Image (tube, rainbow, N blue to C red):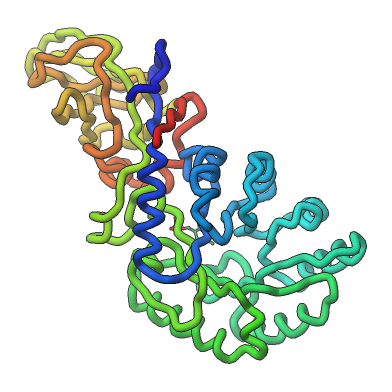
Amino acid sequence: MSDVPESPPRSWAEVDLSALRHNLVAARGLSDQQVMAVVKASAYGHGLEAVACALEQEEIAFFGVANVGEARRLSKTGVRTPIYLLGGTFPTEREEVVAQRWLPCLNTMEEARHFDELARHGGTVVEAHLTVDTGMGRGGFLPGDAPAALEAIRTLPGIQVTGLGSHLPSADEDSEFTHDQFEAFDSLVESLPRRNELRHVHLANSAGLLGYRSRTTTLVRPGLLLYGVSPLDGHGTTLRTVMTLKSRVAVIRDLPAGHGISYGRTHVTTRPTRVGTIGIGYGDGYPRALSNHMPEVFIRGHRAPLLGRVTMDQVMVDLTDHPGCDTGDEVELFGPNIPVEEVASRAGTIPWEVFTSITPRVERVYSG
Ligand SMILES: *Cc1c(COP(=O)(O)O)cnc(C)c1O
């Protein structure tokens, strides 16, 4: 890509912001609800500031972050889109949340009372959403307790409850449970008094948005989908790849049959083998768990198999069948030619973790 630096880093991630915006349009095509763009964990490793700035003009209802540190970073960029904290806050963080007008989700009465106290002390009112635990087990009020909690919190003068949310534990794994969960959530919302005061009702992550419909929600919270990956099979065709992880061939050597490759010598050549050494490893976030699970990389229009274990800074690939390869050649570790889902599954993990594991050593290079 044109804006790779003159003296390039050994490995870098190309992030296509026009693909990100394309995926937002695709997400919007699935429902007429508002969108909270989930940008936690540095926008799934794509870069919090760049992703937020790329989406700032797109009429996003909220940016969803995991914690106060991420909210701070977002605020510093100057974005005007409201910032929503997806998880619980520590008591020491709450004064800043109130002062900065970030939106907390309320998980307990204790949290609500503390926010109320801080807001009244500061002469203000905190806008917040109530979290209901309909199956995730991570936070929020149980459905049986939620109506009373909502009533109680509504009596607190320092808090204005403008929304209600819940989360899906199994939308990409268990459709029966998830259909029941949607039904239970919708029934609960329908049973609440003064329901119209809850302007933002939300349940769906990417899989929930792709595979399910709600009668009551007004807002969806896609993360992975925006980054071009579908958590549900057969839904990815309209999405575009946002991140391409790349490196270069540093060394090419011809080794005889019977030569060990990498730590543990788990691979021993069975034929005279042309071995390319690539400048990326688990120190860059390329998963060590890929070792000996037959991962492939993409080089000069072909797939080439990895040999032996992933080391901290380098991996070895078999270039015997691709004699045209040269040192300095670009190598795609994942991207349009090697789906990140494939890398994740060979590494025994999920695309979310592959994205968020890419370390700061990997320079993010933006286009679009
Ligand atoms: C991370 C997260 C999301 C986004 O999930 P995806 O599966 O990446 O779409 C949505 N809601 C909550 C509460 C989350 O923590």
Q: From the image, which quarter does the C terminus lie in?
A: top left
Q: Residue at x 24, y 10 (%)?
A: 327
Q: Residue 189: where, in percent of width, then height?
A: 56, 84
Q: Residue at x 22, y 25 (%)?
A: 307
Q: Is residue 166 left or right of residue 148?
A: left
Q: Which of 139/323 is in front?
A: 323
Q: From the image, which quarter does the N terminus lie in?
A: top left
Q: Which of 239/137 is in front?
A: 239
Q: Residue 252: where, in percent of width, then height?
A: 21, 10
Q: Residue at x 46, y 25 (%)?
A: 363
Above/below status of 92 relative to 177: above
Above/below status of 144 relative to 312: below
Residue 47 can be seen, yes or no = yes
Above/below status of 292 relative to 33: above
Q: Residue 264: where, in percent of width, then height?
A: 30, 22
Residue farthest along the front direction in this orientation: 57
Q: Is residue 210 left or right of residue 106?
A: left
Residue 258 can be seen, yes or no = no
Q: Is residue 302 left or right of residue 347?
A: left
Above/below status of 147 relative to 355: below
Q: Residue at x 82, y 82 (%)?
A: 155
**Image mark count:** 0
